[in-house]
Amino acid sequence: MTKISSSFMASKQEICLRRPGRNDLAIMSIAVGNPPLTLLHPSEKERYLQLQTPARRNSFLLGRCAAKTALSGLTPHVAPAAINIAKGVFNFPVVYGIGMDNLQVSISHSPPFAIAIAFSEAHPLGIDIEKIKVANGDLLRRVMSPWEVDLTSQLGLDASIGNTVIWSAREALSKIIRTGLSAGFDLLRVQSMVYYEQALLLSFVNFPQYKAIVIIENSYVFSLVIPAGTGIDIVTWQKDVSAGAGLLLFY
C-alpha cells in the first residue's frame, strides 16, 4: 500500500507472467481519491487543464497516477513527474521518459477507482474495470451477440452481471490490440466462458491467441486479457478497511 496523502491512496502488486522458457514481470496498481497535480508531467498537466469538467479531470489524474504507481514497480528510480503518458492514434496510452524504453501501460477507470498495469512491450496486456449497473443492462445487451447472451445464461449469471462481464472482457481485449472499441463489437466477440477457480476464463472468436481472466467482486467486474499461452496466478480482490472508500487490492 502506498499512501501519498490523506486524500489519495494507491497500491501495487507484482504479477508473474509464466511462459515456457521465460517469465515476465508486470505491476498492477489501483488508485482512489484525489492525487496531487505534482505527479503529472508538464505535458500531462497541459492536457489536464484542457479538460472541461471536474469529473473528467479527476478521472484523467487518477488514471495517470495509477499508471505511474504501476510503472514505479518496474523503474523505481524514475520520478513520476518525469514520465509522460501520452495518447496514441487510437487513444491508447504511450509511455515516454528516460528509462521507459519498451515499457507500456493499460489503464481503466470506474469511479471512484482507476486501475493500471505496467508491462514490457514483449508481453502485451489489457485491463478493464466496470461497475455493475442494472440500469446499463439493456444498452450492453444490444451490442452482445445471441451466442454471448447464451453463454452468460448457461453459467447462471444475473443479466446485469453477465452483460458487464462480456463488455469488460471486450474492453480489455480492445486495449491489448490497441484499437479501442473502434475495432467494432463484432470483431471482439466472446467465443467461450467457463468458471476457473475464483474467476471466469473467456476466449475470443477472432483472437484465439488471447484469453481473459474475469473476476466479479464487490459490485465490480475486473478483466485482464493476456496471451493464451501465458500462465498467471489467479488474481483476487481484498478490501482494505483502512481506505475509507473501500479500496480494492489485488494479491
Image (cartoon, rainbow, N blue to C red):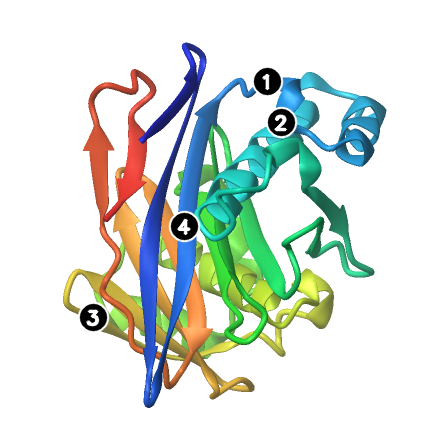
Q: Could one spot residue 137 in this view of the protein?
A: no
SS for tag 4? strand
Q: Nearer the viewer, mark 2 or mark 3?
A: 2
Residue assigned mark 1: 36
Quadrant in the rendering for residue 226: bottom left
Q: Residues within 10 Å of mark 1 (few under 14, many from 20)?
A: some
* Outermost residue to the left: 197
Q: Residue at x 41, y 10 (%)?
A: 6
Cα separation between marks 4 and 1: 20 Å
Of the image marks 3 and 4, the number of the one nearer the N terminus: 4
Residue assigned mark 2: 39
Residue assigned mark 3: 195
117 vs 55: above or below = below
226 vs 21: above or below = above
Number of labels in the image equals 4
Nearer to me, 207 or 80: 80
The amino acid marked with disc number 3 is: Tyr
Dots 2 and 4: beta carbons under 8 Å? Answer: no
Of the image marks 2 and 4, the number of the one nearer the N terminus: 4
Of the image marks 4 and 1, the number of the one nearer the N terminus: 4
Cα separation between marks 2 and 1: 6 Å
Q: Could one spot residue 184 in this view of the protein?
A: yes
SS for tag 1? loop
Dots 2 and 1: beta carbons under 8 Å? Answer: yes
SS for tag 3? strand
Of the image marks 3 and 1, the number of the one nearer the N terminus: 1
The amino acid marked with disc number 4 is: Met
Residue assigned mark 4: 28
Q: Quadrant of the N terminus?
A: top left
Cα separation between marks 3 and 4: 23 Å
